[in-house]
Amino acid sequence: MTDHRQAPATARNDDQTADLASNLYEHVRQLNDATTGPPSLTLPGTAYTILGNLSAATYGLDQLLDQINRFFLRELQADRLGHDQAEDLADVLSRHGQALAEARQHSRALCAALSDAQSTINAVHSRATHGREASPATDGRTRVDDVGVAAAANDFPRPITDPMLLAPPPAGERSRFIRIRPTNTPEA
């Protein structure tokens, strides 16, 4: 059973840090439930906002994974680690570091892919159908019902993969399973 205690904004000990990771899992589970369709996913602007936030979250995973790897290296260097089966810690942490390096590559590729998915639906809006009105944003004005679209535009004025924000992984380090398309940038 997962413990769903509310973690503080800033962790002050290992238990609170673990709670932050537990909350991440719980929020993803809740998003999975919420995005199955109406009533919690009815507007393209909501999907746009979700993709932007997921892209930003995966952008942060790169740093998180690097920090976990650095933690183990510091602890090894300070001789504060042991192994239950008496395996050579340098070998174990070498494999650990390689796995995290691969995960970091995947997180950067996922960030770019999510940002691309978000930018491709930037101009998508709802149309009126039988029993449903069009999204208020289609006439150029935002209304109370369209707050998600306005918030997304304010929060994400540039895609997270903008060269000023994120350098793409070198071509030799890209995963063969994740295809990265060039971003949609206007030409001068």
Image (cartoon, rainbow, N blue to C red):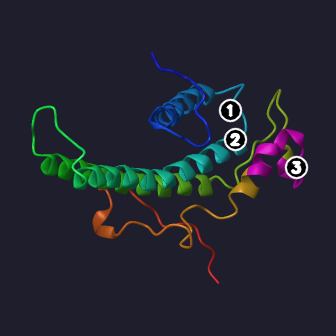
Q: Amino acid at mark 2?
A: Thr
The residue depicted at 47 percent of the width and 20 percent of the height is 2
Which stretch is magenta? 137-151
Q: Which residue is mark 3?
A: 142
Tell me the residue that label 2 is attached to: 46
Mark linked to residue 66: none
Residue 113 in view, yes or no? yes
Q: Nearer the viewer, residue 2 or 185?
A: 2
Q: Distance between the Cα atoms at labels 1 and 3?
A: 18 Å
Question: What kind of secondary structure does the magenta stretch mostly adopt?
Answer: helix
The residue located at (61%, 31%) in the rendering is 35
Residue under circle 1?
Answer: 41
- Furthest residue in direction top, as rendered: 1
Could you tell me residue 28's position as x and y percent?
53, 33
**Mark 1: which secondary structure?**
loop
Q: Residue at x 73, y 38 (%)?
A: 43
Q: Is residue 153 magenta?
A: no
Residue neighbourhood size for the residue with mark 1, other residues' Cα within 10 Å, grouped as few (<14), some (14–19), many (≥20): few
Q: CA distance from mark 2 to mark 3?
A: 14 Å
CB under 8 Å between discs 2 and 1: yes
